[in-house]
Image (spheres, rainbow, N blue to C red):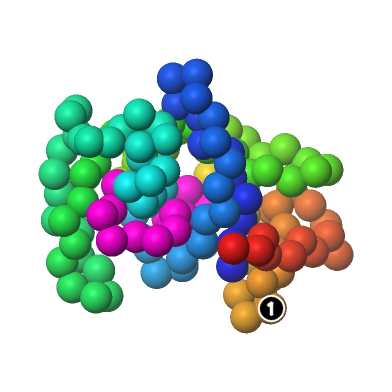
Amino acid sequence: MRLRLRIMREGRGIEVVALLNSGYEAPTPQLLIPVDIARSLGLWPPERASEVILDTAGGPLRAWYYPRAAEVEVVVEDARSPRVLVDLIVSPIADEPLISDMLAEELGIAVESFGRGLWRFRWESRNKLRESAKR
């Protein structure tokens, strides 16, 4: 399932489509981003980041960690999500942004069907189903 997000950092704002990955477990709201998005946000090349090694399903991943580096919100026409302060993880091999479980929680996302790509905000009626964004 994919969601359209707005990422805001130091006066810069960009919109991206990000994959909600239920297997991306994190202790804080995190958004993993590819290098091209990091460059757009002024975070590449990494200067003030900590290098980290992440355990992934594909094995260890070398990435750069920016704690509390941006605010993120879901972009939909008829509602507003909370703005969430996030840790950004920059991955040199990612081809799209990934939303962690804690970020999905803070954004108020309720997944109704991963397979069909249906979701809603937690405060919305169960009848208000939204479709996954197109990649």
Which residue occupies 50% across, 25% down? 12
Q: Give the image quarter of residue 109.
A: bottom right
Disc 1: which residue: 116
- The percent coordinates of residue 96 (x first, y second) are 44, 58
> With 122 as the anchor, is 125 left or right in this view?
right
- The percent coordinates of residue 37 (x first, y second) are 41, 43
- The percent coordinates of residue 81 (x first, y second) are 66, 40
Q: Nearer the viewer, residue 50 or 44?
A: 44
What amino acid does circle 1 point to? Arg
Can residue 68 be seen from the camera position used here?
A: no
Q: Quadrant of the N terminus?
A: bottom right
- The percent coordinates of residue 91 (x first, y second) are 28, 53
> With 31 as the anchor, is 52 left or right in this view?
left
Q: Name the outermost residue toward the top.
A: 11
Which residue occupies 32% across, 47% down? 35
Q: Is residue 31 above or below residue 68?
A: below
Can residue 109 be seen from the camera position used here?
A: yes
Q: Callout 1: 10 Å neighbours few (<14), some, many (20+)?
A: few
Q: Quadrant of the C terminus?
A: bottom right
Which residue occupies 79% across, 64% down? 129
Q: Secondary structure at mark 1?
A: loop
Q: Give the image quarter of residue 2.
A: bottom right
Stretch of the chain drawn in magenta: 90-104
102 part of magenta stretch? yes
Q: Is residue 48 above or below residue 44?
A: above
Q: Is residue 51 above or below residue 55?
A: above
> With 42 as the anchor, is 92 left or right in this view?
left
1 part of magenta stretch? no
Which residue occupies 57% across, 54% down? 17
